[in-house]
């Protein structure tokens, strides 16, 4: 009689399968290291694990895009893959995310495209800009390569559709938000550390410079502006809203410390336009909060002011200390917002913007409806703004304007700008009207916080080209997408 042996399970989760898979992967990795470079083998290994993670948790791709565009990295530091057209890592993550949506539509009968009230405004804004650029390319008024680079940045608005279609579960929203806040905290810590080290030791790439305001130099005061200050600003507003609205006090002290770090980092950026926008936002918060939340907000404000006064008293015991000079520099820079001389030729930064705006108004009047397309050149050479390029970087400031609203008018015309207004108003109205209907207090703070942060961005765009910057376009799409997902889930729970 033959002996019967138990059948060995060979499923994906079986120990035997995992041992054999591990051996095979180890063998393949060894052969790749032998035949090619270890760095290539490492890249393949990371790609395999990243692909597996994204297929299971698509929000990982969105966090990867944020790390690549809105952290301490700059575009020219990212590795590129060339297949006739060069792709950055975030480009692949964005295209891969849309690939997942297409595949799921084809193979999962239950998977449906989610529709939101923001779909059409965003698609119209995107479509008009593409149409305008296509006309400019046909007429050879813009360079193909410059337009392609501008399109790459502009395309990250489409992260909105990745969020609304792939981030559907509460756990996914929490993972994306937690990753967002952790990234902001890391960037803020790096900014503060860079300030402590000073400009002589450059920890971060990019703009690490000695502060100058209206021609006055502040020695030993370092201005730090990595790309990730955008995610720091948004997180500051959102975490403040969550802190006020959440009823649990278990980790409030930790959020308070996190908020202090983010606030310190924003001070070190010395971005006056965003400081002014945040002051406006603080007033709006007082309007939106009611009853107990308003009392908590006022109490929080009084506590913050009291702590600041105590710190200042300690700091100014030594007027020559670096902390005292930072306080004086911040005060001087903020005071320029209320100084009439700032707007009468005494501020070189504002003068630069006013000259740009004069050229822009003239060009917009000549091309009112569809603009000049992405990659435009809107003004002639002007020695007040342009200098010979001895660095070899080749950046043409005739294609750059600091005013984000005028940039959209130049790029997409009045039709494109009106579609941006349509998108912005729809997002803001939905956020401000519906945040109270959200049951979860954290998500309630997120919806209100993202709406307020966008309002700050919109206001500050009169002095910053935020609507088309690499550091902002993915964040804007993700902010809008998260709010729509939360509001949709809130409607489901209420129904």
Image (tube, rainbow, N blue to C red):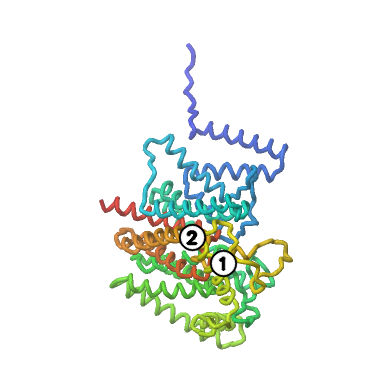
Q: Return the residue nearer the eye: 296 or 162.
A: 162
Q: Taking the image as drawn, is residue 230 in sight?
A: no
In the rendered image, the residue lying farthest to the left is 495
Q: Position of residue 433 (x, y in %)?
A: 31, 63
Q: Taking the image as drawn, is residue 433 in sight?
A: yes
Name the residue: 55% across, 80% down. Answer: 333
Mark 2 element type: helix
Structural crowding at the residue carrying mark 1, measured as other residues with C-alpha within 10 Å and reported as few (<14), some (14–19) or many (≥20): many
Mark 1 element type: loop
Number of numbered discs on residues: 2
Q: Position of residue 227 (x, y in %)?
A: 57, 63
Q: Which residue is mark 1?
A: 401
Q: Return the residue nearer the eye: 278 or 242.
A: 278
Quadrant of the image occupied by residue 375: bottom right
Q: Is residue 402 left or right of residue 421?
A: right
Name the residue: 58% across, 59% down. Answer: 376
In the rendered image, the residue lying farthest to the right is 390
Q: Is residue 148 left or right of residue 105?
A: right
Q: Return the residue nearer the eye: 347 or 165.
A: 347
Q: Position of residue 454 (x, y in %)?
A: 43, 64
35 vs 290: above or below: above
Which disc number belongs to residue 413?
2
- The numbered mark, 2 or 1, whose residue comes first in the sequence reads 1
Q: Position of residue 64 (x, y in %)?
A: 54, 52
- How far apart marks 2 and 1 lie (CA) works out to 15 Å
């Amino acid at each position: 009689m033959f002996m019967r042996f138990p059948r060995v399970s060979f499923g994906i989760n079986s120990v035997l399968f995992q041992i054999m898979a591990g051996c095979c992967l180890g063998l393949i990795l060894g052969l790749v290291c032998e035949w090619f470079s270890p760095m290539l083998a490492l890249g393949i290994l990371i790609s395999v694990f990243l692909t597996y993670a994204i297929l299971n948790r698509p929000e990982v791709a969105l966090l990867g895009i944020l790390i690549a565009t809105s952290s301490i990295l700059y575009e020219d530091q990212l590795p590129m893959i060339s297949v006739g057209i060069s792709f950055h890592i975030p480009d692949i993550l964005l295209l891969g995310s849309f690939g997942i949506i297409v595949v799921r539509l084809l193979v999962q009968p239950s998977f449906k495209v989610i529709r939101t009230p923001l779909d059409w405004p965003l698609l119209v804004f995107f479509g008009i800009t593409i149409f305008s650029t296509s006309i400019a390319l046909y007429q050879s008024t813009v360079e193909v390569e410059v337009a392609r680079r501008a399109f790459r940045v502009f395309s990250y608005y489409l992260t909105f559709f990745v969020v609304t279609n792939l981030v559907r579960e509460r756990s996914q929203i929490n993972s994306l938000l937690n990753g967002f806040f952790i990234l902001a905290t890391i960037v803020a810590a790096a900014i503060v550390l860079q300030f402590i080290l000073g400009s002589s030791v450059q920890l971060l790439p990019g703009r690490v410079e000695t502060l100058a305001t209206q021609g006055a130099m502040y020695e030993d005061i370092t201005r730090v502006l990595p790309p990730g200050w955008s995610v720091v600003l948004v997180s500051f507003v959102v975490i403040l809203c969550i802190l006020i609205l959440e009823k649990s006090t278990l980790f409030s002290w930790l959020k308070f410390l996190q908020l202090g770090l983010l606030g310190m980092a924003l001070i070190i950026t010395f971005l006056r336009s965003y400081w002014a926008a945040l002051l406006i936002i603080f007033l709006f918060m007082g309007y939106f909060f009611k009853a107990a939340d308003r009392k908590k907000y006022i109490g929080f404000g009084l506590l913050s002011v009291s702590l600041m006064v105590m710190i200042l008293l300690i700091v100014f015991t030594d007027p020559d200390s670096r902390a005292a000079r930072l306080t004086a520099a911040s005060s001087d820079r903020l005071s320029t917002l209320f100084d009439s001389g700032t707007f009468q030729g005494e501020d070189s930064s504002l003068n630069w913007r006013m000259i740009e705006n004069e050229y822009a108004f003239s060009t917009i009047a000549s091309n009112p409806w569809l603009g000049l397309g992405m990659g435009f050149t809107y003004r002639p050479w002007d020695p007040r703004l342009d200098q010979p390029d001895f660095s070899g970087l080749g950046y043409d400031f005739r294609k750059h304007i600091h005013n984000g609203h005028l940039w959209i008018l130049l790029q997409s015309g009045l039709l494109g700008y009106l579609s941006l207004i349509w998108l912005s108003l729809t997002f803001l109205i939905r956020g401000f009207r519906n945040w109270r209907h959200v049951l979860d207090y954290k998500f309630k703070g997120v919806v209100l916080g993202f709406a307020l942060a966008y309002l700050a961005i919109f206001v500050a765009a009169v002095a910053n080209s935020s609507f088309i910057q690499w550091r902002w376009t993915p964040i804007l799409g993700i902010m809008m997408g998260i709010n729509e997902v939360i509001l949709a889930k809130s409607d489901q729970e209420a129904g």
